[in-house]
Image (tube, rainbow, N blue to C red):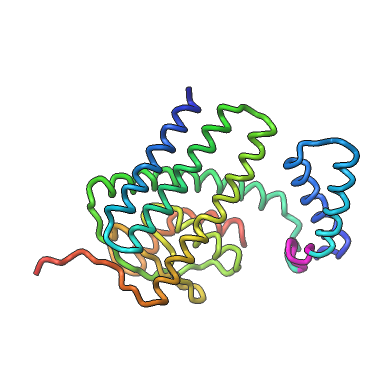
Amino acid sequence: MYKKGVRLVLTFFVLMSFWLVLSQNLQPTSLLIGALFSFLVALLSFDFLIKPDEGIRGRAIRTIWLLFIYVFVLLYEMFLAGFDVVYRVITMDINPEVVMIKTDIKSDLGIVLLANSITLTPGTITIDIEGDHLYVHWLYARTTHFGHAAELIKGRFEYWLRRIFT
Amino acid sequence: MIAYLFIFLGLVFIFFGTLGIIRFPDIYTRLQTSSKCDAAGAVALLVGLMVREGLDSLSLRILIILMFLLLTNPVASHAIARSAAIRGIKPWRKKKKC
């Protein structure tokens, strides 16, 4: 559990580095304005960026590292998805179905990331979420079986996300 | 060279994504091509620009744009698909031989 001041300072540093990257300017005036507004925004919004009950276990660095790897896994899958969809566009060989799959991930952020990843990968879009059930529209449905479809769609994303959010 | 390869790949993805929007039968399948191919194409374009620019402050800014794109693109297509499902639009299905 982080104290209020620690969360405030962390939010301030995130906002300030964002300002430095975007403004590309080391003049004192620019730095002063950036610090002032970063502090004001941090004061208003530190409660949303870092929740009070997050980061208890003190392994933020591991989480960030795993997320970094996850982005590369995601990019690789995205390019495969792009080629797959291009092939489908050329041949018009489609067989759309809506399937329902179930996930084991409990945390809200994890489910959101899983749904977004499913939307970015080969021919699948998450339509709706109810609890831990996801309704997925599949461009080329190889199967409509509950468990098998889930295995094909979630694949390795759930493996990585379970490592990140447990 | 690698940079131009990436940029060309992005253009190809975006071209076929747009072609798919014209060819496919209903809203969900059109959404598939528009979300997927445009995301992959835009990412390829931005990565190409980053490689061309080298390790620079500009490519850092491009990286931030890329992150925002990866976060917002699926959310937008998800919102469109969900609103279509709530309005009760049935997905197009292949005609079965009987």
| Residue A157: percent from left, percent from top | 49, 55
Q: Magenta segment, principal secondary structure?
A: helix
Q: Residue at x 40, y 47 (%)?
A: B37
Question: Which corner quadrant holds the C terminus of chain B?
Answer: bottom left
| Residue B4: percent from left, percent from top | 47, 27
Residue furthest top in the image = B1
Q: In this rendered view, identify the residue nearer to me: A92 or A79.
A: A92
Q: Residue at x 84, y 35 (%)?
A: A26
Residue B66 relative to residue A146: left or right: right
| Residue B51: percent from left, percent from top | 56, 29
Where B60 sits versus A151, above or below? above
Q: Residue at x 27, y 66 (%)?
A: B92
Residue furthest left in the image = B98
Where B40 sits versus A108, above or below? above
Count of picture labels = 0
Residue A107 relative to residue B88: left or right: right
| Residue B64: percent from left, percent from top | 64, 44
Quarter assignment of residue B8? top left
Where A32 sits versus A125, above or below? above
Q: Residue at x 61, y 39 (%)?
A: B62
Q: Say if the magenta span includes residue B50.
A: no
The region drawn magenta spans: A45-52
Quarter assignment of residue B81? bottom left
Q: In this rendered view, identify the residue nearer to me: B89 or A130.
A: B89
